[in-house]
Image (cartoon, coloured by chain):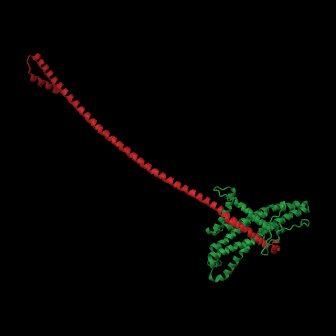
Amino acid sequence: MAESGKIDPMHQFAIEPLFGTDHWSLGGFNIAFTNSALYMVLAAVVLWIFVIGGMKRELVPGRWQMAVEYMTGFIKNLLISNVGEGGKKYIPYVFSLFMFILLANLLGLLPLGLVGLHPFTFTSHFTATGVLAIMSFSIVLIVGFWKHGLHFFSLFVPHGTPLAMIPVIFPIELISFMVRPFSLGLRLFVAMTAGHVLLKVLAGFVINSSNAGIGYGLTVGSASFVLMIGISALEMLVAVIQAYVFALLTSVYLNDAENLH
Amino acid sequence: MPQIAQIADTYSSQIFWLLLTFGLVFFVIGLGMVPKVQGTADARDAKISGDLDAAKAAFARADEAEADYRVRDAGNRAAAQATLAKAKSDATKATEVKLAAADAVVAEKIAAAEARIKGASDAAMAEIETVAADAARDMVARISGVEASDEAARNAVKAALAHG
């Protein structure tokens, strides 16, 4: 790629089986341990280490314990403000979801390419975000029908809808409800993909313009580099915000399931 | 776009590993560890609010004790004042009684003394009368050679004494 002067900004999303596991399969399905799976495991392990630091259970917390308790308290407040007191039982799920996505986003942003490794953001794959979105959506459906039975369908008829409008409103509300898992999964996938593509394109500008000559390197290259620094900071923000949006929307949807409306 | 180009080859591995890792995260961390962390935070919040409540209760008790103390203090003061006033009035009464007794004794003594003085003065008067009557008789005898009677001399002296 480099010799042709072309840098493929999409290569970072390529999934490669690692350690010769390409032929692992389960029930006929391929379950190769890929770089994507490696980052999922890394996110889980980092999260595990992070939470272990919060398990000291001291009355007067240290910094680490404080940080872990801040995160659980943050999720607790998110659920209480969106779902109410009944939302507390979803703390384990929403905390896992938020921290897993957050760490996936942040680990994917690590500048490991500098030491020759291939950093990978599995949240830039809709196969991964789609599973998470479907999981959240399934929980909403299960809780909704469990708690309210068929009465859950009243969710699609807002209060005060005139009787004549119900045949029109109901399909609209139903469609907007059914679109939720897609918007939930695609939003995260698109945000992460776009950010990483933008970073790689700018990095390509830096490399290609520098190769084209010192004049280009100093003008286009340095301008792109400065822009990259800013966008890297922005991407860190996006990594946090997208994880937050995922958790927030999950709790908003859980509110529908818990309380109808 | 590898996300789409590779989907047929990788979707099963992606879904499998995601479910496995997220499942571990959810069951081990979410269900196993987070409630403990949250429990610690809740216990701390409960302890803080409990301590605050205890402090408030202690404040209330202190206020109560102070009010109680004030009431008792005021009562004690009133009692002390009453005791003092009673002691004062008792002392005054006792003084009065003693004074009256002393007055009586003094008055008695004065009366006795006055009586003695009066007796002495009467006796002196009588003596003066006798002496004056004798002197008058002597003077009458010497001047006129007439022997004046004792009684006439006495009357004359009495008349003279009465006129001063």
Tell me the quarter of the picture where residue A162 sits. bottom right
Query: Would you say residue B52 is visible in this rendering?
Result: yes
> Hue of chain B?
red
Location of the C terminus of chain A by quadrant is bottom right
Q: Is residue B72 left or right of residue A148?
A: left
Residue in the picture at 29% in, 39% down = B97
Question: Is B123 situated above or below B78?
Answer: above
Query: Would you say residue A234 is visible in this rendering?
Result: no
Q: Viewer-proximal residue, A99 or A252?
A: A99
Q: Is residue B22 left or right of residue B82?
A: right
Location of the N terminus of chain A by quadrant is bottom right
How many callouts does the rendering have? 0
> Hue of chain A?
green
Place of residue A241 in the rendered image (x, y in percent of width and height, measured from the top left): 73, 65
Place of residue A185 in the rendered image (x, y in percent of width and height, measured from the top left): 74, 72
Question: Is B121 situated above or below A170?
Answer: above
Q: Is residue B42 left or right of residue B100?
A: right
Tell me the quarter of the picture where residue B158 sits. top left
Place of residue A160 in the rendered image (x, y in percent of width and height, measured from the top left): 61, 78
Q: Viewer-proximal residue, A25 or A261?
A: A25
Place of residue A14 in the rendered image (x, y in percent of width and height, measured from the top left): 83, 69
Tell me the quarter of the picture where residue B22 sits. bottom right
Residue in the picture at 22% in, 31% down = B112
